Amino acid sequence: PTQKTKAKASKLTKPVKSTKPSHGGSFHIEFKNDAQSLAWTQFKQNDVLFLVGPAGTGKTHLACAFAIEQILAKERKRIILTRPIVESGESLGFLPGEFSEKVQPYMMHMYDCIDSLVGREGVWREKIDYAVEVAPIAYMRGRTFHDAVCIFDEAQNASILQLKLFLTRFGENSKIIITGDPTQSDLAGKVALVDIMHKLRGVPGIGFVEFKANSIVRHPLVGKIIEKLES
């Protein structure tokens, strides 16, 4: 059965479902399992949160939901989105257009999450669109993000230097969420995300939630596929 845990003005399902503003409701997150509920608790208690685990556990959805809740609750003013620009085993070659157009394909999954959470139009979407900034890692040095929820997605494809750079960007009244699946890195060699997590465990203000295969919230077959392919 679905476990319902109200988080301040918040709810998560599908992995995320929300009450429509036209009905006079506030944004809600309805958690589907204990791991998602724990993630919310860790987010509220810490300034840095690592969400790691297999595909389909709702890591990116959770990160986006938490960030949206903070904007709509007026706790923070900005959502910073970033991820390593790494292709999944297939090179697309040169991409035409302006820089923002080149980066856009890599960010689509996060925009898909936002679409499912607040829709593509309406009051909520206008507020979120105004708050969101895509900040490529390559241009992040020297920046500081205040009053923001900063999301680093697909961190299993990041280097030590990239993760260190991101982790040192947040300023006053900001939070960082780093998501990733160490088993799905597209880079050869050691996964930097694992090393970073190992070094930061025990540091006050940093939380960790590790999802297992039984926390998968996509199609039921996803869990079975992952189990067979990783056995």
Image (tube, rainbow, N blue to C red):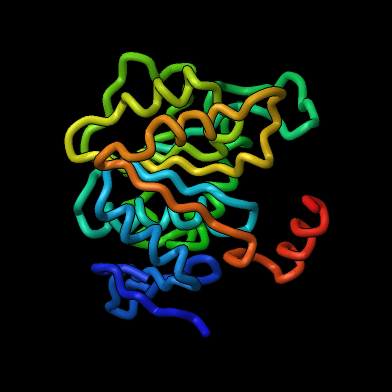
Which quarter of the figure has residue 135?
top left
The x and y percentages for residue 164 are 41, 22
Instruction: Please give left or right for residue 102 compared with residue 115 in the image.
Output: right
The x and y percentages for residue 155 are 54, 35
Q: Residue at x 48, y 21 (%)?
A: 162
* Number of numbered discs on residues: 0
**Along the viewing direction, whichever of 105 and 189 lies nearer the viewer:** 189
Q: Is 91 located above or below residue 88 in the figure?
A: above
Q: Is 227 located above or below residue 136 in the figure?
A: below
**Along the viewing direction, whichever of 79 and 94 lies nearer the viewer:** 79
Q: Residue at x 47, y 17 (%)?
A: 161
The answer to whether residue 79 is visible is: no
Instruction: Please give left or right for residue 156 compared with residue 226 in the image.
Output: left
Q: Is 92 located above or below residue 115 in the figure?
A: above
The answer to whether residue 147 is visible is: yes
**Along the viewing direction, whichever of 165 and 210 lies nearer the viewer:** 210
Which quarter of the figure has residue 157?
top right
Instruction: Please give left or right for residue 104 compared with residue 43 in the image.
Output: right
Q: Residue furthest bottom?
A: 1
